[in-house]
Amino acid sequence: MRDLLVKIALKLGIYKQLVEINTAYSARKKSKSFHKYGLETLIQADKAFRLINVKMFLCFGTLLGAYREKNFIDHDCDLDVGVFANQRPDNLDEIMEKFGFRHKRQFYVKQTGIITEDQYEYKGVQIDIFYYFEKDNGDVYCYGARRHEYKEWKEANRTDGFPSVLWRCPATTFSEQEFLGHKFFMPDNIKNWLTSLYGATYMTPIKNWTDKDSKTDIIYHTERLYRRYYLK
């Protein structure tokens, strides 16, 4: 039934609008869990990675909130953390399950098999784990998946995958910094990281921000990402 409705929506040219409505509804539901269990989720994930001596650091919206608001961003409904790709253990699912997480989704490059992102869920809160790769000059980058140019996600995943971008950030070291009464790793070069991700105006809150709102160091390229689903 779902596939039939999708075909009808695509034919009528209203698929994108329906996706946006569904996304907004889903975000409202996630927001309730996030405000109740967001910090607990972050703490549990940090414990999981510390157990295996892997440095998990805040990135994207979670990092921005920690620096700018000293809190989570009001309209945020998931968590963003980073781990260096060469430190991702093969038994990550097993480790995360010990701390109450369920594997939800994974993004990867089909041609190379590179895993670019894992998404886990804890008490209704989603945490996105982005895997960072280091360049020769010390700069780092991670992949970001985008919505397909015109296909619905099931068809896109079966065929040519999803467009992606590289989020580039300058070389940095990481240290523990306080956030909401707990210590988490963050980049020491935090101002330049946030400028690379959100532009020079990152201290000005913009609801529903997109990379078109500011000059960033985002790199558009040709690699396509695919999804693996774990939760039904």
Image (cartoon, rainbow, N blue to C red):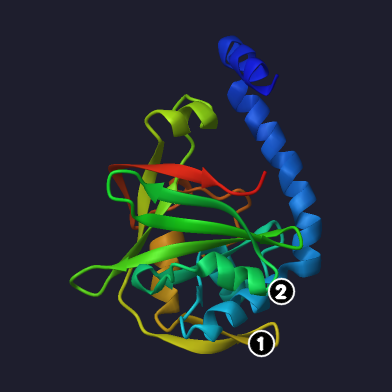
Residue 81 visible in rendering: no
Q: In this view, does 139 lie to the left or right of 175?
A: left
> Among all residues in the image, which is located at the extreme left?
136
Residue 102: image x %, image y %? 65, 60
Report the residue marked by disc 2: 39
Q: In this view, does 32 lie above or below 36?
A: above
Could you tell me the amino acid type at mark 2?
A: Leu
Residue 133: image x %, image y %? 31, 66
Report the residue marked by disc 1: 182
Viewer-proximal residue among 61 and 116: 116
Residue 27: image x %, image y %? 72, 47
Viewer-proximal residue among 5 and 112: 112
Could you tell me the amino acid type at mark 1?
A: His
Q: Residue at x 48, y 25 (%)?
A: 151
Question: How busy is the neighbourhood of tag 2: few (under 14 within 10 Å), some, or many (20 plus)?
Answer: some
Q: Is residue 5 above or below residue 221?
A: above
